[in-house]
Image: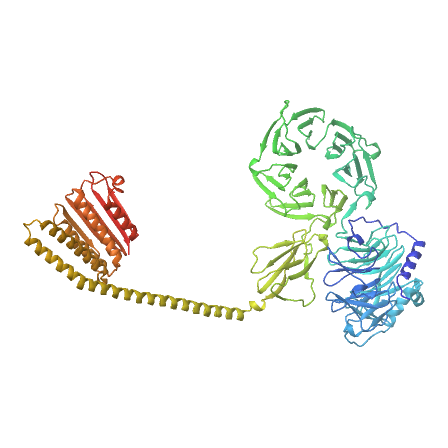
């Protein structure tokens, strides 16, 4: 039948029956973070705790095994490969595999994210008081009584060595090794006999004992004491004996010359076996296992409450269990050798300082007029061991000079809600919501000053001046004995708007704001401290614990700014739950000698350790499978997992990622998973770092990986595709240009054929029709001369003129058909000749200017004809209608554009009236439109006429 936990339950029941307390050991109250089943742990019953070489905390429970990284639990059960859900021991071998001993007497191990079972199903016997570890040869060792049982399995890959399984041969988990001589064994047996322990008691597990090696010390461990021996070459020699009491369940060496003693209902003792110093934690709890990790944190396993983490066991906590009336502490003050704590409900606790580690706590109730607003708002110590107490209902004075708390009775000095108190010499100032009041002459003379709607929050003396903080800025106030005080707003250029608190040491004044942190005012210099340099920009309280140390209390912890070199240099330390405070919500702090008292909403923290310059940096590791995939196909999600270990950060870790050479800035993430969905093909390096809550960065973790292209994204295929595309484009372009050349060739042939046809028609018309018309013209001219005096002369002369006109038109047609006249120069010459003929019989003087050059620019016959007829029409109009003395004709050619200008100095006309009245003007416009030319006619009555034509050739 499996062992399960029957033996452990019987042991615990027996120890309940013989419950004893160890009253001489003061109970140490520290801040403990509790993790149980509701937080992700498999079970609230913890059998064993262990930290591996990477830094993970492994927890053995009755329902499986959990791995904890400070943020998340990774759980394993029999469904994942565990031999059994109830696990009693955990150990790491030299190959960094994690082995689990379960209640079926077998063990299995975790490697690369999976749990593996051993091929050999040999059973192992591990008694409750035994130790379970691997030695330097990677042998599984079970340490019990005066010997070490060594187990060999093929999967362990143990190193062979000479001595094995010998009585008196002792190993240690950190590579220690010791062979006990006969004399050494006699010394140990004599010590055991003095305590009524023997081989029989160990075998029956009634009074178990075992040996443990720790550095150069040999420990003989029992449930009542630990005998320490110094290991020397000559043998072992007694060094010290440490006794403990209570119902002890186990004793674990925890390093640094300490052992952890777990008990039933007496919590856990941490004992230095060399000095005898001991501390007790978790009273009234059944503790089962203890670990001091590499960050010097304390881990306590419990029987029914999961496990507890203390990040700084040196910080003591004063809470309701210690005797406080209320754990929500608002104000602190020291007077007459007592620490006074102000709470809600008008309760004032007091603690005698410097008496013993756990002094009794007394309380004083302050009678107030109202029950709804009754907080302690201010505690100020004044000369004569007197305490001024500000509340929501007034100011009370408390005389503690007689050192007799029973005679202390608060006396009311003033009524109304008090926001703050400041004292200097024999003057006391205090503020309400919108007024400042001063008391002097042993606080007998009272003077009030009104501040209109400023919502006052705080006040402080700075260089003999009263500074007033408000929701609308900072003001300087000077009492003048009148009904209204003189106050002016100061430092407006620094944009200090909402002032929540002030603190002055007369050399420097600290100004706490709502969102902009702390402003330090030193002479004329202003220094600002804001997040993340300090815990938060929202400041609750500022305290000078000495001339060079400023405390800034916030909802995210307290920041301690230590100044040097006349405030030129400074160093910032942060205190919060990661340092052992019971809460991050800090309201106040005071100093008494080397002790600092810090008020939170979960009690008061007491510490002497303020520096955190040597806090361990977080460690970031790859949480994937060893040798995990580093090559991905395009389109496949790229996912990497890393985990940061920083238990002092209490799970508050920020991860930052960037692709080296791609990302300029870091991207922040709350978890260690980084995913890419569509990264272009290529080689990449993903850099990951972790930042703890003190803004410390871990070393970088680099993931090198490649994104492989799909088959159609392969380079050779892309090259082939590009080459094929180039060939196809070349063939298409070639075919296109061949078709263009073919069309051009065809057009050229057509144009050549047309030119030949025009040449033929021109020749035939000139040779045949032209000759016939010329003959008719000559005969009519001769006939008209013969009948000059006869009646038929007019008819014959009209026929002659008609034939002459036909001859002119025919010559124009022949000229336009002749391809040899297609150059612009021929057109200009033809127009020149015809213009001379037009003006031969007129009184108008023609001025010509031709500038067409010798460039062979062609103009086809139809365009030549239209241009000529347009010019002819314009010249004829000048002769017939202009009554001009001079006419001007200019023909020029510039960049394949023909310019023709025709103008006169005649009588001109109104173009709007004549445009549609005369055939000539309409013809000119019609011919310009056919030519698609730009025509402009500029004329006015008495100002001549100007016609310009621009034609693109």
Q: Examine the rendered structure and indicate whether residue 296 appears above or below residue 909.
A: below
Q: Nearer the viewer, residue 230 or 887?
A: 887
Against 497, residue 305 (above or below) is below
Can residue 728 be seen from the camera position used here?
Answer: yes
Please give left or right for residue 683 compared with residue 235 in the image: left
Relative to 730, residue 241 above or below: above
Query: In the drawing, does residue 250 fall left or right of residue 469?
Result: right
Where residue 842 appears, as percent x and y from the top left, is: 12, 47
Give the image's coloring scheme. rainbow
Residue drawn 46% across the image and 70% down it: 727
In this image, 99 relative to 782: left or right? Answer: right
| Quadrant of the drawing holding the C terminus | bottom left
Task: Locate the N terminus and report the quarter of the image it occupies.
Answer: bottom right
Residue 655: which quarter of the image? bottom right
Residue 905 visible in the displayed image: no
Position in image of residue 647 (x %, y %): 73, 55
User: Which residue appears farthest toward the front when viewing the image?
Assistant: 791
Image location (x, y in percent) of residue 569 = 60, 47
Name the residue: 69% across, 62% down: 623
Residue furthest out toward the top: 483
Q: Residue 366 or 761: which is nearer the viewer? A: 761
In which quarter of the view is residue 675 placed? bottom right
In the image shown, does 264 or 707 lie closer to the viewer?
A: 707
């Amino acid at each position: 039948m499996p062992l399960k936990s029957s033996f452990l339950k019987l042991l615990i029941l027996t120890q309940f029956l013989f419950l004893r307390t160890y009253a001489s050991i003061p109970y140490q109250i520290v801040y403990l973070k509790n993790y149980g089943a509701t937080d992700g742990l498999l079970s609230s019953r913890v059998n064993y705790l262990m930290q591996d070489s990477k830094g993970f905390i492994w927890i053995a429970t009755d329902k499986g095994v959990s791995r904890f990284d400070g943020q998340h639990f990774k759980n394993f059960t029999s469904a994942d490969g565990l031999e059994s859900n109830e696990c009693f021991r955990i150990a790491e071998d030299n190959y960094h595999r994690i082995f689990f001993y379960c209640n079926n007497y077998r063990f299995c191990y975790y490697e690369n994210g999976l749990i593996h079972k051993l091929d050999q199903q040999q059973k192992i016997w591990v008694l409750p008081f035994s130790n379970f570890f691997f030695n330097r040869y990677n042998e599984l060792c079970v340490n019990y009584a005066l010997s070490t049982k060594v187990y060999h399995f093929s999967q362990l890959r143990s190193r062979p060595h000479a001595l094995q399984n010998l009585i008196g041969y002792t190993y240690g988990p950190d590579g220690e090794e010791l062979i006990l001589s006969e004399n050494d064994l006699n010394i140990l047996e004599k010590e055991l006999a003095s305590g009524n322990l023997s081989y029989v008691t160990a075998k029956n597990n009634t009074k178990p004992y075992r040996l443990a090696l720790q550095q150069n010390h040999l420990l003989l461990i029992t449930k009542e004491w630990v005998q320490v021996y110094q290991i020397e070459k000559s043998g072992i020699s007694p060094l010290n004996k440490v006794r403990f009491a209570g119902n002890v369940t186990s004793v674990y060496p925890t390093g640094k010359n300490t052992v952890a003693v777990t008990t039933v209902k007496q919590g856990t003792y941490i004992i230095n076996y060399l000095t005898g110093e001991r501390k007790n934690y978790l009273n009234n709890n059944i503790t089962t296992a203890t670990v001091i990790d590499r960050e010097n944190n304390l881990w306590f396993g419990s029987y029914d409450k999961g496990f507890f983490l203390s990040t700084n066991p040196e910080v003591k906590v004063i809470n309701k269990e210690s005797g406080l009336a209320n754990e929500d502490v608002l104000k602190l003050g020291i007077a007459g050798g007592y620490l006074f704590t102000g709470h809600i409900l008008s309760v004032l606790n007091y603690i005698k300082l410097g008496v013993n580690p756990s002094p009794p706590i007394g309380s004083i109730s302050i009678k107030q007029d109202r029950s709804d607003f009754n907080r302690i708002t201010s505690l100020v110590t004044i000369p004569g061991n007197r305490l001024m107490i500000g509340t929501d209902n007034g100011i009370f004075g408390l005389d503690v000079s007689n050192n007799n708390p029973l005679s202390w009775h608060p006396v009311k000095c003033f009524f109304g809600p008090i926001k703050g108190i400041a004292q200097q010499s024999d003057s006391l100032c205090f503020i309400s919501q919108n007024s400042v009041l001063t008391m002097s002459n042993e606080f007998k003379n009272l003077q009030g000053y009104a501040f209109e709607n400023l919502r006052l929050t705080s006040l402080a003396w700075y260089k003999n001046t009263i500074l007033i903080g408000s929701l609308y800025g900072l003001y300087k106030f000077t009492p003048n004995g009148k009904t209204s005080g003189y106050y002016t707003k100061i430092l407006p250029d620094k944009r200090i708007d909402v002032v929540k608190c002030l603190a002055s040491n007369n050399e420097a004044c600290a100004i706490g704001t709502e969102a902009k942190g702390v402003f330090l005012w030193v002479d004329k210099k202003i220094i600002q401290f804001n997040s993340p340099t300090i815990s938060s920009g929202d400041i609750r309280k500022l305290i000078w614990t000495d001339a060079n140390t400023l405390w800034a209390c916030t909802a995210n912890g307290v920041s301690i700014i230590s100044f040097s070199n006349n405030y030129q240099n400074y160093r910032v330390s942060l205190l919060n739950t990661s340092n052992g405070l019971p809460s991050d919500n800090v309201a106040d702090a005071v100093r008494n000698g080397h002790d600092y008292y810090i008020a939170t909403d979960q009690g008061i923290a007491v510490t002497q350790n303020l520096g955190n310059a040597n806090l361990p940096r977080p460690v970031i590791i790859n949480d994937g499978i060893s040798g995990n995939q580093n090559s991905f196909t395009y389109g496949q999600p790229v996912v990497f997992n890393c985990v940061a270990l920083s238990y002092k950060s209490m799970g508050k870790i920020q991860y930052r990622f960037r692709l080296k050479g791609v990302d300029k800035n870091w991207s922040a993430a709350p978890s260690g998973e980084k995913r890419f969905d569509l990264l272009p093909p290529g080689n990449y390096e993903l850099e990951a770092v972790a930042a703890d809550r003190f803004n410390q960065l871990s070393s970088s973790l680099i993931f090198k990986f490649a994104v492989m292209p799909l088959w159609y994204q392969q380079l050779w295929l892309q090259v082939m595709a590009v080459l094929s595309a180039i060939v196809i484009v070349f063939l298409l372009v070639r075919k296109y240009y061949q078709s263009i050349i073919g069309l051009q060739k065809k057009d050229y042939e057509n144009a050549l054929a047309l030119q030949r046809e025009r040449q033929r028609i021109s020749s035939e018309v000139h040779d045949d029709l032209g000759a016939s018309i010329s003959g008719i013209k000559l005969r009519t001219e001769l006939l008209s001369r013969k009948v000059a005096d006869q009646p038929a002369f007019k008819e014959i002369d009209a026929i002659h003129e008609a034939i002459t006109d036909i001859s002119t038109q025919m010559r124009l047609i022949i000229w336009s058909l002749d391809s040899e006249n297609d150059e612009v120069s021929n057109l200009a010459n033809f127009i020149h000749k015809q213009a001379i003929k037009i003006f031969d019989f007129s009184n108008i003087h023609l001025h010509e200017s031709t500038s067409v050059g010798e460039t062979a620019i062609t103009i086809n016959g139809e365009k030549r004809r239209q241009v000529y007829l347009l010019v002819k029409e314009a010249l004829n109009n000048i002769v017939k209608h202009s009554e001009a003395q001079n006419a001007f004709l200019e023909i020029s050619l510039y960049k394949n554009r023909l310019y023709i200008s025709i103008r006169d100095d005649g009588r001109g006309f109104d173009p709007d009236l004549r445009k549609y009245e005369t055939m000539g003007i309409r013809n000119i416009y019609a011919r310009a439109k056919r030519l698609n030319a730009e025509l402009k006619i500029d004329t006015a009555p008495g100002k001549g006429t100007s016609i310009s034509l621009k034609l693109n050739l």
